[in-house]
Image (spheres, rainbow, N blue to C red):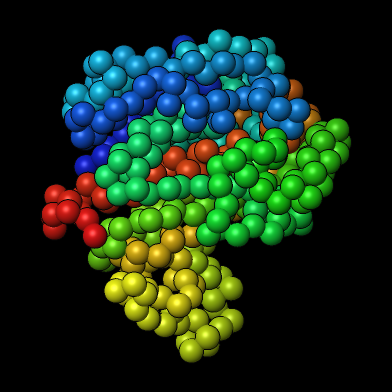
Amino acid sequence: MGSNFGHLFRISTFGESHGGGVGVVIDGCPPKIEISADEIQFELDRRRPGQSKITTPRNEADRCEILSGVFEGKTLGTPIAILVRNQDQRSQDYDEMAVKYRPSHADATYDAKYGIRNWQGGGRSSARETIGRVAAGAIAKKILREIAGVEIIAYVKRIKDLEGVIDSNTVTLEDVESNIVRCPDSDCAEQMVDLIEQVRNQGDSIGGVVECVARQVPRGLGEPVFDKLEADLAKAMMSLPATKGFEIGSGFAGTVMTGSEHNDEFHTENGEIRTVTNRSGGVQGGISNGENILIRVAFKPTATIRKEQRTVTNAGEEVTLAAKGRHDPCVLPRAVPMVEAMMALVLCDHLLRQRGQCGEVQ
């Protein structure tokens, strides 16, 4: 019921924020891919809470346990199950939210849909669900690197009105991880950190934009019509918590250009057909063209804040709520590995689909 993603490389995530744990089952992973818990843990550590002064102080190590599908360091081709146990829940912080709806959160809509919800930490609507995606994304990244040499790098492009200057063609993982806000523009990153701390001290939150580039993507990935590559990327990114917008290539900026300004002219480079510019963002007609795939994802300010706001109870009584609990004043730094994971899951799925239908990728 909405917890599965992908076709040939297919994942199912499970778990709630304050339950016993969260995780993922991966089906369709090719056999003999070398993978270790440490490789998965590296990505989970980038996502975990409590990693810096600008993230939620919830203290979770998020240690992964590979339960099946891997033997002697290699994938078996059978379902891979990965579990991360919850250890630092403070369910009492949410007692008031058992009846009061948090503004702009999923509380009211979950009640409307199911007539019941796990109000402790948001249950299934918590961003803690993304642990399974990031774990699966680590394996998808490994497959993409081994088969096609694909590299995926995401970073914080903008927080509120502060925007970094970053070259998507050359940015590295080391650049991204050089500061706690994960913005490779070091001067802008310092301002972002100061702004996040200021907003947190006010009991408020802010949002921004994560940009992500996939380099060395083979030509031919994507299916015409309903499963266009950018369509699947849009669904993947918009399925992440707190997302409110998606762009690829020129995005909305392309709407103010003429066709002659926007078109990516072709030329030949070292015997290969390339484009002079990349306003298409690496995808044309729903199919990858061999250029870098460049996307941007907009994240809203964190919905749960300490400032008092008007709301209602599940009985319709008008009340106020100043939320307790431990929450990110800005989700952007921890969203970076989530965006990378979803990019990897989409590209890995389409890579396997392309190989199955048309043979080796170009």
Task: Identify which residue is drawn at 59% across, 81% down.
Answer: 256
Vertical arrangement, residue 131 with respect to residue 275, above or below: above
Q: Which of the pair 335/74 is nearer the observer?
A: 74
- Residue at image position (71%, 51%) is 185
Taking the image as shown, residue 362 lies to the left or right of residue 13, namely left
Give residue 242's quadrant in the image: top right
- Quadrant assignment, res 79: top left
Residue depicted at x 35% and y 43% = 145
Residue 10 visible in this rendered orientation of the protein: yes
Q: Residue at x 50, y 44 (%)?
A: 339
Where residue 311 appears, x then y in whole percent?
A: 72, 37
Instruction: Name the image quarter holding the C terminus.
Output: bottom left
Location of the N terminus by quadrant is top left
Does residue 72 appear to the left or right of 139 in the view shown? Answer: left
- Relative to residue 50, is residue 161 depicted above or below? below
Task: Using the rendered image of the protein, determine whether residue 231 is visible from the camera's viewpoint.
Answer: no
